[in-house]
Image (cartoon, rainbow, N blue to C red):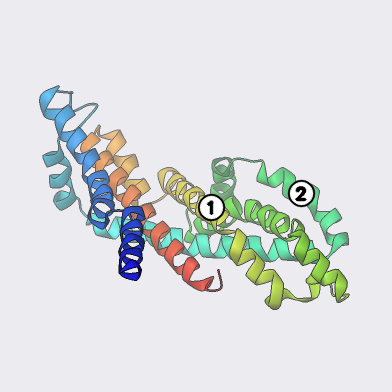
């Protein structure tokens, strides 16, 4: 009898400590519909002017009336974002690892990296337009330059500030972590670099849109630029909503894939 009672008490305590699954699933759903509800309430109950807040019906109508299709604009922006982000991430990580592996190279290149990473990504847009015109190569390289240096610094810091237990281990076996690129360096970066990579994704999105605003014939940035010149606030809202959804989706895919790759955590 005592055994049964103890088992029941243990089960009850576990259930008491376990969060309600239904409530935990409802919270994200409420968060998703909260902003549209606020939008509708502000528009139809406070009568905000279309100049500041377009009606949801106008935004939906714009999605079907834009020529070429808004899907084409979003697809072009997505391709530029993904290509530039992947190339910039790879370039930044390689530069960071190279800096970590060579003290001489680190002393040589560190001042340049420190100065380049302090320049706002948007500030390099005019240079690339002058150098590459309105070519796709210039837009991709613009994203690479916008995120590579920050990732290089983050990579170097992650490898330099290794845990004390790792330092003791390497010292005990007289091994340099610089000689273990695939065995230690890459796994170490996979464990620590995700927050910086996610921030770089948002930066890359901003650079892509800036490049499209200043010189492009297609893309969400171009769509916003042409809408601004015609005072089409509903089109700007549409492009902004798509940008938010696009960034959230890519960030979600990146995070899930990264966490699956770091299977040992």
Q: Which mark is residue 200?
A: 1
Indicate the quadrant containing the N terminus: top left, top right, bottom left or bottom right.
Answer: bottom left
Dividing the picture into quadrants, the one containing residue 174 is: bottom right
When the figure is inspected, residue 179 is found, relative to residue 258, above or below; the finding is below
Residue drawn at x 17%, y 42% as measured from the top left: 59
Where residue 182 sits: x, y (%)? 68, 77
Where residue 165 sits: x, y (%)? 76, 64
Q: Residues within 10 Å of mark 1 (few under 14, many from 20)?
A: many
Where residue 143 sits: x, y (%)? 53, 54
When the figure is inspected, residue 139 is found, relative to residue 232, above or below; the finding is below
Of the image marks 2 and 1, the number of the one nearer the N terminus: 2
Q: Which mark is residue 112?
A: 2
Q: Is residue 177 visible?
A: yes
246 sits left or right of 91 in the view: left
Q: Which element type, helix, strand or loop, lies under badge 2?
A: helix
Residues at marks 2 and 1, CA–CA distance in whole angstroms? 19 Å
Residue drawn at x 34%, y 40% as measured from the top left: 225
Most extreme residue toward the front is 1
173 sits left or right of 151 in the view: right
């Amino acid at each position: 009898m005592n055994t049964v009672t103890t088992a029941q008490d243990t089960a009850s305590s576990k259930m008491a400590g376990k969060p309600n699954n239904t409530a935990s699933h409802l919270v994200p759903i409420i968060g998703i519909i909260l902003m549209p509800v606020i939008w509708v309430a502000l528009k139809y109950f406070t009568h905000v002017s279309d100049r500041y807040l377009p009606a949801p019906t106008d935004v939906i109508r714009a999605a079907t009336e834009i020529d070429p299709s808004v899907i084409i604009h979003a697809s072009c922006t997505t391709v530029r974002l993904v290509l530039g982000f992947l190339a910039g991430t790879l370039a930044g990580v390689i530069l960071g690892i190279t800096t970590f592996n060579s003290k001489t190279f680190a002393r040589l290149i560190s001042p340049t990296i420190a100065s380049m990473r302090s320049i706002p990504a948007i500030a390099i847009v005019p240079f690339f337009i002058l150098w590459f015109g309105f070519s796709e190569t210039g837009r991709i390289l613009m994203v690479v330059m916008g995120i590579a240096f920050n990732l290089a610094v983050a990579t170097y810091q992650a490898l330099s500030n290794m845990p004390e237990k790792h330092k003791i281990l390497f010292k005990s076996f007289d091994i340099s972590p610089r000689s273990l690129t695939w065995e230690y360096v890459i796994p170490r970066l996979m464990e620590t670099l995700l927050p910086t990579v996610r921030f770089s994704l948002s930066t890359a999105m901003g650079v892509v849109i800036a490049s499209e605003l200043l010189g492009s014939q297609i893309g969400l940035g171009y769509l916003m630029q042409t809408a601004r010149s015609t005072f089409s606030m509903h089109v700007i809202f549409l492009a902004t909503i798509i940008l938010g959804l696009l960034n959230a989706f890519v960030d979600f895919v990146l995070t899930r894939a990264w966490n699956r790759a770091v299977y040992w955590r």
